[in-house]
Image: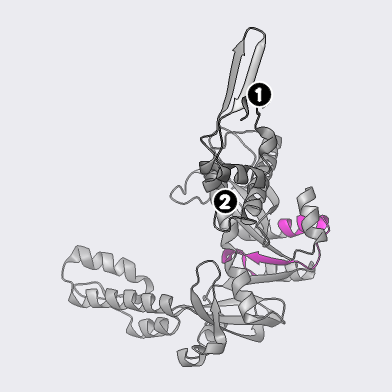
Amino acid sequence: MSARSQTLLSNGASAFYYDVTRQIYYGNDCPYAEHGYFPGETHKRVLGFGMVTSAHRQHPVLCRAIRGSRNDTVTVEDTVNHLKSWGFKKLTLILDRGMISKDNVEFIVKSGFDLVGLVPSNNKEVWDYITRWSDADLERPQYVVERASSGVQVYVRAWNAPLLGRKQMRVALVLDPVRAANERVARDGLIHAVDTAANPKRLSELREDLGDLAIPAPGRRGFVIDRDGAARERIGDGRFLVFSTNPDMQADEMFRVYFQRDEVEKAFRTLKGQLSLGPIRYRRREHIDAYTTVLYMAYLLWSRTQERLAEKYLTMTVTKALESVEDIHLVRFEAGKQKFEWTTRRSQEQEKIIKLVGAGEFLCSDKSSGR
């Protein structure tokens, strides 16, 4: 564990986000590379990278390689064991909905941690909770919560109830009115298009877009619309269920802590973009493990730089900071045995940024040049 992670631990940081990303493997042989899911490339060999970041400033806590065929759900136990072995206690893990299962919930709770997650509405228990209240029961001032990253306001109402095999969970029903309206208009538009379309190709496209609402049936079209199913879906439009294993967690806190998890997705975008994760060509296990350490350190420096920038520039990103200082150059002049080095002149704004991120010591200056 890094010194930074130890600092987070000693300061009592309690919320950590965990997610997995995958990269295509370019090579002949690698113990981590296996056939697995990759968007748009389902038949490629891939390897995964699991990352844990802190909720505070999104510093990386753990980065490790994962075999490409392993489902994200089964990586949770190993991740929790890593955190336990480093001495973390009573922290809250926030996981993607694809990692939520009864077994993972039980393992996390028995490990002494709490879990916050979002449950897909794919079973009767969850659907009963999602449809528990009418829009009128939810759309009240006391239930309004604002999403910090976007300013979008939603309604969130929480209560304690059984869920995922546990007798007592904190459950929060979220209603996003804008999302609900968009979903209803989109569905109604498809149904209207089916009612008026005659072109077979267009009907085939609409059938695919309707999904389960298109029921196979004899006739020219080959399907009919499940009107009752459409009415049921309408009830759940714009609604989803967030839960916490901590029965005392407040509704607004559950909502905010879960939807800040897009920060770990931003970390992956940074790794794949500015920090150039991939293409992966290393073959040996120890080389891949060493590479994950490099990724960890690179993002640690990146997130630490972002933290320093935020002290003076709340909206400036590391990318923008790098762009603002990219025209600074080191000049070296040699004549015989004499050598002079200096950096090009810097603006006051550039000086402030350099000082904030602690990069001044890397810039040479020739005292005689006054630069």
Q: Quadrant of residue 342?
A: top right
Q: Residue 343 location in percent, x, y?
A: 59, 29
Q: Residue 77 location in percent, x, y?
A: 72, 60
Q: Quadrant of the C terminus?
A: top right
Q: Indicate which label's residue lies in the foreground, 1 or 2.
A: 1
Check if residue 99 falls in the magenta segment. yes
Say whether residue 65 is visible: no
Task: Determine the residue positioned at 46% across, 89% down.
Answer: 135
Task: Determine the residue positioned at 68% across, 81% down.
Answer: 169
Q: Residue furthest top?
A: 336
Is 198 placed left or right of 160 in the picture?
A: left
Q: Residue 115 location in percent, x, y?
A: 69, 70
Q: Amino acid at mark 1?
A: Ser
Q: Indicate which disc residue 368 carries.
A: 1
Query: What element does badge 2 sit on?
Result: helix
Query: What element does badge 1 sit on?
Result: helix
Task: Determine the residue positioned at 62% across, 37% down.
Answer: 30
Is 183 placed left or right of 78 in the picture?
A: left
The magenta segment: 78-101
Q: Quadrant of residue 170?
A: bottom right
Task: Determine the residue positioned at 60% across, 54% down.
Answer: 20
Q: Indicate which disc residue 268 carries.
A: 2
Closer to the chain start, of discs 1 and 2, is: 2
Who is closer to the viewer here, 309 or 196?
Answer: 309
Cα distance, mark 1 to mark 2? 45 Å
Q: Relative to 185, say whether 281 is above or below.
A: above
Count of numbered marks: 2
Q: Amino acid at mark 2?
A: Phe
